[in-house]
Image: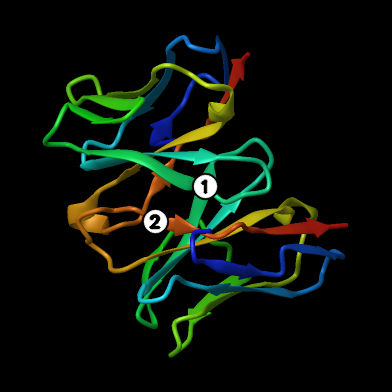
Amino acid sequence: DSGVTQTPKHLITATGQRVTLRCSPRSGDLSVYWYQQSLDQGLQFLIQYYNGEERAKGNILERFSAQQFPDLHSELNLSSLELGDSALYFCASSFSTGALSGELFFGEGSRLTVL
Amino acid sequence: DQQVKQNSPSLSVQEGRISILNCDYTNSMFDYFLWYKKYPAEGPTFLISISSIKDKNEDGRFTVFLNKSAKHLSLHIVPSQPGDSAVYFCAASAKKSSGDKLTFGTGTRLAVRP
């Protein structure tokens, strides 16, 4: 158990809809990262938040947005969903950006299926 | 642009033998490298890491080698065990410029045959 909690574990929805994925980081971790893993692909970095502020942005579509709340949990919002958005979405956390270890702790992922 | 590449999508080895997983990178700013293991229906878990100031790091049966001039790293598992069967992801970060943000390869699926 990594200590990172993601909900929901599975989600099936239709094209054009909007969904919200939720992540609670490990206790004490200030940074939250979102990654997308499509079929047979590596983990693609989407976005990072550190203590409530956006720190880094990757290949995140404009239809997607995220935020980190004062209690440090984070939400990833996916809107106008397309078939190609079907993927595993992972949340990861770390204590700080620039930490010596560099290790990220991952949740079990949220599997999104768009029909 | 795939900055971290794992060119072998799969690898099969006999139990007790050595497993060697390879990874290449293109970004010379990367200064920290990690290997993650992923079982089905689980999130990736950290396995071992190496800083760019080293060329080898060992942890039990797992050893990571870094060749900076070739921009290549490898993970050696000796001896391989059936429980090692998983997908292994190579990851890299440019800690001085990008902090802990990791760039991942596409993974290598390791199957260890009993």
Left or right placement of residue B1 versus residue B67 in this view: right
The chain containing the residue under callout 1 comes to B
Q: Looking at the picture, how far across and down is residue B96, in whole percent?
A: 17, 54
Residues flagged by tags 1 and 2 on a common chain: no
Question: Mark on residue A34?
Answer: none
Residue wearing tag 1: B44
Q: Residue sitting at 49 percent across and 38 percent down?
A: B37
The chain containing the residue under callout 2 comes to A
Q: Are marks 1 and 2 in contact (CB under 8 Å)?
A: no
Occupied quadrant, residue B114: top right
Occupied quadrant, residue A109: bottom right
Left or right placement of residue A19 versus residue A40 in this view: right
Q: Residue sitting at 48 percent across and 11 percent down?
A: B16
Secondary structure beneath label 1:
loop
Which is more toward the observer, B111 or B16?
A: B16
Which is more toward the observer, B66 or B85?
A: B85
Q: Which quadrant does the N terminus of chain B fall into?
A: top left
Q: Which residue type carries mark 1? A: Pro
Q: Looking at the picture, how far across and down is residue A55, in whole percent?
A: 34, 70
Q: Which residue type carries mark 2? A: Leu
Secondary structure beneath label 2:
loop
Residue wearing tag 2: A104
